[in-house]
Image: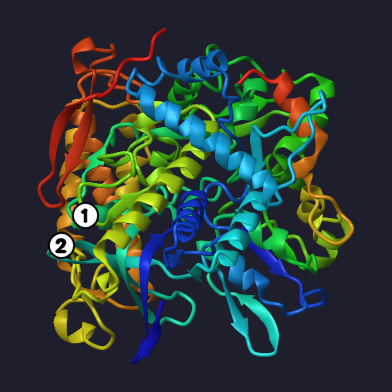
């Protein structure tokens, strides 16, 4: 469940407001968007993936928050962690062309 | 395409309107546009991130056009599906999927190179795939309406001619008149929070049924995915590497990710928590698995759990008809419904034609989405063209079974405050989520649930729907109630166990019931049997 939009990191591009499939966020004029309908969050991590500023954290539990503070999340390198794994962002290569995908398919029985 | 604002209503005219912007809708829009149609695509969320495909990786039923390989592919799940798939449809989908996947490469999807130096096209990464599909759809000149759920279809005496809905960002109503409509709204997972599935509430089934379309195979609607109790991630495939345990570390006999899922369900019903550990995955496979499904590991990493070494509690999350195979009944090769001007694609349409009553992994589902989307997009484009230039200027009216009223008229029509949509949703979930109702079905249980579901439906359909944010939830509740009723009515009629449909009181497959069940109607539901057409697959 979406837990945090970091005021310090957010660049107010409002991409999260656009890409959220369940319309959890609201824009705010000249400010950071707000988590307006937290209970509608389906924990799909798409906002985190699209956030260009690594400013968001989605707690893994679909119904519960982690209770971690922004400082703790930052320290644990959890902000932007998913985006890095998928290979999105400047200077990264998307995992869609990762050689492991073909090797994995060879080894697993469908 | 012309557009104008009438009052605060966005009015658009198009040749083809596509409802839903997942893979099926995107392929439908792309194909219709390529045939020269003006296309509008309305998505409930955001075309590119919405739906079950976007968040994760999926296999794709991509098979080289070589007779032996194709034959093996067709046979692989034919028996599991209860021999309800059709040879000709499997051939068509294999062919179309092969073509579409090759095109995707040319359009910029970056496939991996396999160890032999070839291109590996048997999988897609959802975020990348759907981001590209959005780009392609836009480039084709399709007008995308994001955050714009459709609330009802529009029709005249000749057939379906558009849809109306509301923008959830801004609240303005929209209305698109069109020569043909493609429903690509996905299946129904009953807001179970299975990964990416909460936008999939059966909306398209309801709208299609209100126009007179039928459903097929709705008894194949009890798919449950294994997921950690603390997570929305429902990628069951990796549990083939799991062992299942009780809390004290003793093995749960017979539990497994495929055939042993019922064992897990039975233990959970007895209130015994089941734990999993992916201890069957060899060490050198683990990094490969981590790349194959990045978000499978995300919750574990965030919880500080190593799923290869640590036991973690699991549950079964309902995926309904998203992984189930039931959906809107298709009457010909263009994915037309029986209603003129109305087409269906992807999970919204029945997937029985290629899967029968069972789907294992996502590869058939991904193939069906892109193929049926292509078929429906082309069919809708030709149909719209056949109507002539003024098709979108017809006088059409809304078809919602509960009247949709514009802003401000609500209070005067209602004496008592309406029941919140959430209450209806909870009432439906209580009938479809429990394993002892939906996974393990009995005549008594189905009858019992249907009695309550009929009550929910009666109540919902009498309440006028106020055109605001709540309207969307109300229509979702109505769609879920309707879906649950079709599911259980057909489940009642199929007095055998076939595909994923399990009747505790009829545990065997009955050869005499080798047919499809077609459901129709809203207030009164009827079920009829239809012969499976085409030659059988030779085994």
Q: Quadrant of residue A5?
A: bottom right
Q: Residues within 10 Å of mark 1 (few under 14, many from 20)?
A: many
Q: Nearer the viewer, residue B42 or A54?
A: B42
| For marks 2 and 1 on the same chain, the one whose residue lies earlier in the sequence | 2
Please say if B400 is above or below B226.
below
- What mark, if any, has residue B130 been given in the picture? none
Please say if B89 is above or below B230.
above
Counting labels gives 2
Please say if B87 is above or below B449.
above
Residue B361 shown left or right of residue B117 in the figure: left
Q: Does residue B315 appear anywhere in the picture?
A: no
Q: How is the image coloured?
A: rainbow
Q: Nearer the viewer, residue B129 or B437?
A: B129
Image quarter where the N terminus of chain B lies is bottom left
Q: Nearer the viewer, residue B121 or B58?
A: B121
Q: Pinpoint residue A25: horizontal percent, then vertical percent.
A: 58, 73
- Disc 2 designates what residue? B158
Mark 2–mark 1 Cα distance, whole angstroms, equals: 7 Å
- Disc 1 designates what residue? B340
Q: Residue at x 40, y 81 (%)?
A: B2
Chain letter of mark 2 equals B
State the SS at label 2.
loop
Q: Quadrant of residue B16?
A: bottom left
């Amino acid at each position: 469940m979406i837990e945090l939009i970091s005021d310090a990191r957010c660049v107010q591009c409002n991409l999260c407001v656009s890409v959220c499939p369940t319309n959890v966020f609201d824009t705010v004029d000249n400010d950071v968007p707000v988590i307006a309908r937290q209970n509608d969050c389906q924990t799909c991590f798409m906002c985190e993936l699209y956030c260009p500023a690594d400013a968001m954290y989605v707690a893994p539990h679909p119904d519960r928050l982690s209770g971690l503070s922004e400082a703790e999340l930052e320290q644990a390198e959890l902000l932007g962690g998913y985006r890095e794994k998928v290979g999105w962002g400047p200077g990264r290569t998307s995992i869609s062309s990762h050689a492991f995908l073909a090797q994995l398919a060879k080894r697993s029985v469908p | 395409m012309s557009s104008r604002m009438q009052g605060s209503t966005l009015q658009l005219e198009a040749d083809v309107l596509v409802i839903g912007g997942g893979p099926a809708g995107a392929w439908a829009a792309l194909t219709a546009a390529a045939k020269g149609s003006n296309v509008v695509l309305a998505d409930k969320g955001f075309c590119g991130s919405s739906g079950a495909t976007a968040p994760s990786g999926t296999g794709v039923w991509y098979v080289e056009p070589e007779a032996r390989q194709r034959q093996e592919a067709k046979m692989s799940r034919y028996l599991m599906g209860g021999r309800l798939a059709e040879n000709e449809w499997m051939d068509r989908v294999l062919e179309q999927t092969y073509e579409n996947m090759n095109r995707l490469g040319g359009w910029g999807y970056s496939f991996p190179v396999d160890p032999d130096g070839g291109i590996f096209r048997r999988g897609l990464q959802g975020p990348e795939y759907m981001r590209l599909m959005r780009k392609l759809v836009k480039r084709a000149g399709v007008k995308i309406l994001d955050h714009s759920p459709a609330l009802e279809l529009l029709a005249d005496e000749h057939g379906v001619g558009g849809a109306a809905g509301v923008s959830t960002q801004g609240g303005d109503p929209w209305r698109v008149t069109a020569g043909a409509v493609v429903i690509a709204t996905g299946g129904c997972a009953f807001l179970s929070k299975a990964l990416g599935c909460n936008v999939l509430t059966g909306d398209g089934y309801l709208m299609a049924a209100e126009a007179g379309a039928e459903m097929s195979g709705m008894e194949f609607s009890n798919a449950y995915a294994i997921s950690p109790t603390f997570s929305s991630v429902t990628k069951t495939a990796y549990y083939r590497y799991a062992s299942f345990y009780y809390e004290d570390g003793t093995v749960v006999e017979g539990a497994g990710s495929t055939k042993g899922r019922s064992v897990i369900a039975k233990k959970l019903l007895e209130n015994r928590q089941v734990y999993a550990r992916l201890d069957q995955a060899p060490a050198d496979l683990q990094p490969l698995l981590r790349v194959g499904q990045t978000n499978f590991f995300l919750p574990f990493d965030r919880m500080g759990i190593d799923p290869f070494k640590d036991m973690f509690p699991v549950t079964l999350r309902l995926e309904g008809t998203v992984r189930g195979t039931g959906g809107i009944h298709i009457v010909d090769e263009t994915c037309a419904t029986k209603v003129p001007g109305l087409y269906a694609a992807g999970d919204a349409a029945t997937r029985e034609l290629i899967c029968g009553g069972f789907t294992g992994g996502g590869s058939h589902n991904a193939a069906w989405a892109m193929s049926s989307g292509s078929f429906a997009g082309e069919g809708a484009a030709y149909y719209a063209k056949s109507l002539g230039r003024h098709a979108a200027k017809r006088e059409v009216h809304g078809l919602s079974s509960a009247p949709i009223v514009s802003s401000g008229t609500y209070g005067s029509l209602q004496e008592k405050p309406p029941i919140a949509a959430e209450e209806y949703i909870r009432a439906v979930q209580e009938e479809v989520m429990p394993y002892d109702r939906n996974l393990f079905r009995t005549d008594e249980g189905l009858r019992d649930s249907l009695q309550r579901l009929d009550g929910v439906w009666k109540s919902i359909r009498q309440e006028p729907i106020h055109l605001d944010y709540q309207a969307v939830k109300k229509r979702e509740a109505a769609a879920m109630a309707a879906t649950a009723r079709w599911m259980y009515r057909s489940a009642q009629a199929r007095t055998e166990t076939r595909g994923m449909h399990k009747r505790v009181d009829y545990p065997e497959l009955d050869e005499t019931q080798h047919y499809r069940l077609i459901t129709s109607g809203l207030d009164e539901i009827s079920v009829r049997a239809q012969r499976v057409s085409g030659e059988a697959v030779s085994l």
